[in-house]
Image: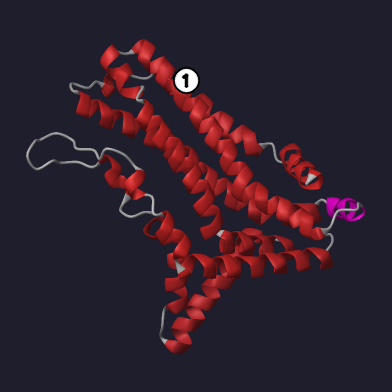
Amino acid sequence: MNTYIWLVRREFWENRAIWVIPLAIGAFMLLCALFGRPDLMAVSSATLGRTVGQAFLGAVGATFFAVMSIYAAWYLLDCLYADRKDRSVLFWKSLPISDAATVLSKLATAVIVIPLVYFAAADLTTLLMAFIISVRASSIVGGALWQADLWLQIQVLWLYLILTTAIWYLPVAGYLLVISSWAKRAVTLWSILPPLALILGERWFFGTRVIAHQLGVRLFGFSDVAFNANLASWASAAAADHDAIRTPADIWSFLDFAGFFSGMATWAGVAAGAALIFGAIQLRMRRTEV
């Protein structure tokens, strides 16, 4: 266990962007809260105030989550390639650390540690922004941002997303690690070419789109598997009897634990991801510098 802890610490030392990027995003958002226009969040009722609170918490969390997803993918694509490019792989291979431990530590950093860092940054940023806006704006706006149940729901949503995306996108992470451990140059291009070639080849020779469909489901079908309904309806519009914005009481009804963990697609992805990660470890054992 100590070995993995030190390997993860190494990733923080060598990849400062893990914490610098969320820090920069948080600083920018705080500047917006300090010098922006809080009157734009003015509310006239408790119902509307709840919607404003949901929109505020959701927007901050979604921003951090989107940036985190892009950076985690880039990190996976670069982590093993960078070791070979700067020849530090030779130093690490001289230590009593297995290639499996190295690859698994980088995988854990991408799918667990980086999301947790962004989760903490999003929470801290949201708290500070809510405090600043509450001081600058009216009490009604301030009250809309301090709703304990909404804060709790956001925490649960973040943790649920970290767990389920780590499992669902395991084959994507494994594939990126394979490319990172194999490619001699242009890792981004090599990550795109194989699936594109398979899609075009299948379409050309067989006239079908099975591969494209499966890739689409894996890349964009997460919400259909992990949630009971469209998450956007958490803050939905239009109650039929009143021209007010209607919001569900909570987010719990949207989280589909049973459906996600009992689905064949989930565990088929885990099996494919495990195979790809094993392939990345084997390539790491056989390749040295670029």
Does residue 1 show up magenta in the picture? no
Quarter of the figure with residue 278: bottom right
Q: In percent of the image, x 79 and y 42: which residue is there?
A: 6
Q: State left or right for residue 185 relative to residue 234.
A: right
SS at mark 1 in the image: helix
Our reading of the magenta stretch's main secondary structure is: helix
Q: Please state which of residues 69 and 154 is positioned toward the viewer in this rendering.
A: 154
Image position, residue 172 (x, y; %): 57, 62
Q: In percent of the image, x 78 and y 45: which residue is there?
A: 7
Stretch of the chain drawn in magenta: 87-94
Query: Which residue reaches farthest bottom?
Result: 205
Determine whether 245 is above or below 100 in the image.
above
Image position, residue 4 (x, y; %): 77, 47
Determine whether 234 is above or below 101 in the image.
above
For disc 1, the marked residue is 128
Q: Which quadrant is home to the C terminus?
A: bottom right
Q: How is the image coloured?
A: secondary structure
Whether residue 221 can be seen here: no
Quarter of the figure with residue 192: bottom right
Q: State left or right for residue 226 relative to residue 18.
A: left
Amino acid carrying label 1: it is Leu
Q: State left or right for residue 165 relative to residue 15.
A: left
Image position, residue 72 (x, y; %): 59, 48
Whether residue 204 can be seen here: yes
